[in-house]
């Protein structure tokens, strides 16, 4: 037994009021368990919803936007330099969606240490021919290996094999919506018409489903060369370059930098999906608000119990002070008491929270839109447990501080003489 | 132990009560107690003898005048410093025994010693047991303090007062709540302490017999020492 005398006194007082202390601890336990459950479940859902979009979204996308030129001929004529030139109804002229100098750009990007993966892409507007009807759509020519490795392409293939795009010439993977409308199965050959009017036959090697009808109803994927052929372009024709970074938070600055160096338009993932970010934020705020409310309620419980204990223990406090314990010693005794309640209640809460989340993790959650998910999503993140125990300690410290300060100010003379 | 000078000394202490009306409780009280002296303070109820004791004990700091304990002025010390003085130099015995009911008898005796940290826990425990033994209650050491009889509790309180070898032991009616047999036991313990260990004693009491047997009687009336 080598513990400080202050701690020993706290502990003895705590055990003497075991039932009350347990109730106080139960309040903290409940608060922390709910916090862990809520935050794990909510962020699990957030992550799932975000990944629906973000997995298939490059961190930075390089492309040429179709925009009217800002540099109009009149600006180059020196004599109007000091004039205000207003030109209305400017139209884009001869804009090429092709990225220039793609081969050196790809090389430079691949050697950039911030970049994990570079996926060139060719987007082609097409019509899917279904009998006499033409359905509007887009074929994305992709580098299949990079897509599978770095953009989780395989997770969204519900039938067939993505790698077949490279193995089978003139092959295509259809979006589920497109496939349903064309009643196309794997192995069948479909007809599509390119925007230039050329008709091509392609073999279906797979069907993908992202879970968003707007995508699944129009998009399909083919290899780069197939798409370039479809457009009648050579093999250095790319419309987009998709970049995946080591750190997603770098995306906005990196996008600006690439845009300047390579003189293309660059869009970062944060800008492209701003609405997802704000949804995530709101859900997080709700989670934390609910948890903090629960903990404040638990804090009031501790405050009450300590206050009561101090009234009951006036005599003991007076005698401690008379025998040489200072006001700050007495304060520490009661703050310790509160912190012990917080530590025990909090730890049990973490454990209980883990049990709850594990239970939720077992509940089946099947939806046609999300082929990769079979139970409710839970985000097991050690950070939440740190936040949880920090919350517990902070609330109990504050709840204990005020009664403890009151105890430290008790005048022993009043108590001892009052008898 | 230093036998020159006084263990405790007051110079012109004045104290007022403000509630319900302003009242001059102590008027220019000057008192000195030497090492090993056994002093009792008597007087009518309300003459200010307990008030004086609590000022001497350093617990009450609301007074004018000077208080010296072992030639060290108490006036400039803060709460922390005064607590240290109480812990190290003063032992207390009250009319109502004021033990901590959650702790065992032994632990009650040990707590001020553990706070002082001069000795290891084992040494403090050994010393506490020795004190309990001389007071004849070592068989109760492991009992919870609230299970003891009044006389036993008072003896535990005395053992606690002795644990840090204080310069002076103060008592506020320590026998006020005890029958004559227990009173005698307590008195004998006190005089033993004063003669054998040269620790001073300052006991406030109503008990004439008790007072008559001490070295010196300080009689108070109306906030003044009259003899």
Image (cartoon, coloured by chain):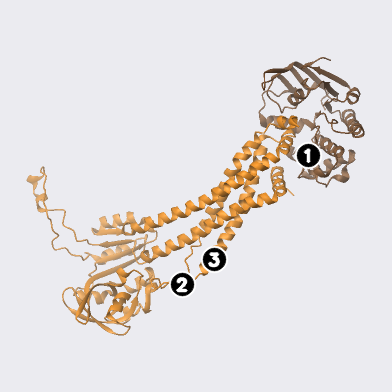
User: Is label 1 in a helix, a strand or a loop?
Assistant: loop
User: Is label 3 in a helix, a strand or a loop?
Assistant: helix
**Chain with brown colouring:** B
Is residue B49 found left or right of A10 in the rendered image?
right
Q: Are marks 1 and 2 on the same chain?
A: no
Cα–Cα gap, marks 1 and 3: 50 Å
**Colour chain A appears in:** orange
Query: What chain is tagged by disc 2?
Result: A
Find disc 3 in the rendering and name its residue: A358
Cα–Cα gap, marks 1 and 2: 64 Å
Provide residue B66's location: percent of width, then percent of height.
71, 19
Is residue B178 found left or right of A211 in the rendered image?
right
Is residue B221 found left or right of A296 in the rendered image?
right
Provide residue B136's location: percent of width, then percent of height.
90, 40
Which residue corresponds to the image point at 86% horizontal and 45% vertical from the top-left? Answer: B140
Position of residue A314 relative to residue A100, above or below, is above
* On-image quarter of the C terminus of chain A: top right
Task: Report the label total.
Answer: 3
Find disc 2 in the rendering and name its residue: A374
Specify the label residue A375 is tagged with: none
Cα–Cα gap, marks 2 and 3: 14 Å
């Amino acid at each position: 037994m080598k513990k400080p005398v202050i701690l020993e006194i706290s502990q003895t007082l705590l055990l003497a009021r075991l039932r009350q202390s347990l109730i106080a601890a139960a309040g903290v336990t409940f608060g922390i368990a709910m916090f862990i459950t809520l935050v794990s479940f909510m962020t699990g859902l957030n992550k799932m919803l975000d990944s629906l979009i973000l997995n298939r979204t490059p961190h930075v996308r390089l492309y040429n936007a179709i925009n009217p030129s800002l540099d109009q001929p009149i600006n180059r004529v020196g004599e109007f330099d000091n004039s205000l030139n207003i030109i209305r109804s400017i139209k884009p002229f001869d804009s090429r969606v092709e990225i220039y100098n793609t081969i050196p750009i790809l090389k430079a990007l691949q050697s950039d240490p911030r970049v994990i993966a570079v996926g060139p892409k060719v987007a082609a507007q097409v019509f899917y021919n279904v009998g006499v009807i033409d359905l509007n759509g887009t074929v994305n020519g992709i580098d299949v290996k990079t897509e599978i490795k770095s953009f989780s392409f395989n997770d969204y293939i519900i039938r067939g094999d993505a790698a077949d795009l490279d193995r089978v010439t003139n092959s295509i993977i259809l979006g589920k919506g497109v496939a349903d409308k064309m009643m196309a199965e794997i192995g069948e050959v479909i007809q599509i018409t390119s925007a230039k009017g050329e008709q091509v036959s392609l073999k279906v090697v797979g069907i993908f489903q992202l879970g968003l009808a707007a995508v699944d109803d129009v998009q399909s994927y083919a290899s780069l060369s197939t798409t370039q052929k479809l457009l009648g372009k050579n093999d250095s024709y790319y419309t987009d370059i998709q970049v995946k970074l080591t750190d997603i938070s770098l995306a906005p600055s990196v996008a600006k930098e690439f845009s300047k160096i390579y003189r293309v338009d660059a869009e970062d993932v944060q800008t492209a999906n701003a609405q997802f970010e704000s949804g995530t934020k709101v859900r997080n705020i709700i989670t934390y608000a609910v948890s903090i409310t629960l903990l404040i309620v638990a804090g009031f419980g501790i405050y009450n119990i300590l206050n009561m204990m101090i009234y009951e223990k006036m005599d003991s406090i007076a005698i401690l002070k008379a025998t040489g314990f200072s006001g700050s010693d007495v304060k520490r005794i009661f703050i310790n008491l509160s912190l012990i309640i917080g530590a025990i209640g909090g730890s049990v809460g973490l454990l209980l929270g883990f049990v709850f989340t594990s239970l939720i993790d077992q509940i089946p959650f099947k939806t046609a839109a999300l082929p990769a998910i079979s139970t409710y999503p839970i985000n097991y993140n050690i950070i939440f447990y740190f936040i949880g125990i920090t919350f517990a300690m902070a609330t109990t410290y504050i709840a204990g501080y005020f009664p403890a300060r009151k105890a430290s100010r008790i005048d022993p003379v009043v108590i001892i003489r009052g008898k | 132990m230093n036998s020159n000078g006084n263990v405790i000394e007051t110079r012109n202490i004045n104290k007022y009560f403000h509630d319900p009306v302003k009242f001059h409780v102590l008027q220019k009280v000057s008192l000195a107690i030497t090492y090993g002296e056994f002093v009792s303070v008597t007087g009518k109820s309300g003459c200010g003898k307990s008030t004086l004791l609590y000022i001497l004990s350093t617990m009450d700091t609301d007074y004018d005048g000077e208080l010296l304990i072992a030639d060290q002025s108490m006036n400039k010390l803060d709460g922390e410093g005064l607590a240290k003085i109480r812990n190290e130099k003063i032992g207390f015995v009250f009319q109502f025994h004021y033990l901590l009911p959650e702790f065992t008898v032994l632990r009650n005796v040990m707590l001020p010693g553990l706070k002082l940290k001069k000795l290891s826990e084992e040494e403090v425990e050994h010393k506490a047991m020795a004190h309990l033994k001389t007071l004849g209650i070592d068989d109760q050491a492991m009992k919870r303090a609230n299970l003891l009889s009044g006389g036993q509790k008072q003896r535990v309180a005395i053992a606690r007062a002795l644990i840090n070898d204080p310069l002076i032991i103060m008592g506020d009616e320590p026998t006020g709540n005890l029958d004559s047999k227990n009173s005698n036991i307590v008195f004998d313990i006190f005089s033993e302490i004063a003669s054998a260990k040269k620790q001073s004693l300052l006991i406030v009491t109503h008990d004439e017999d008790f007072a008559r047997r001490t070295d010196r009687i300080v009689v108070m009336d109306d906030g003044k020492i009259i003899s």
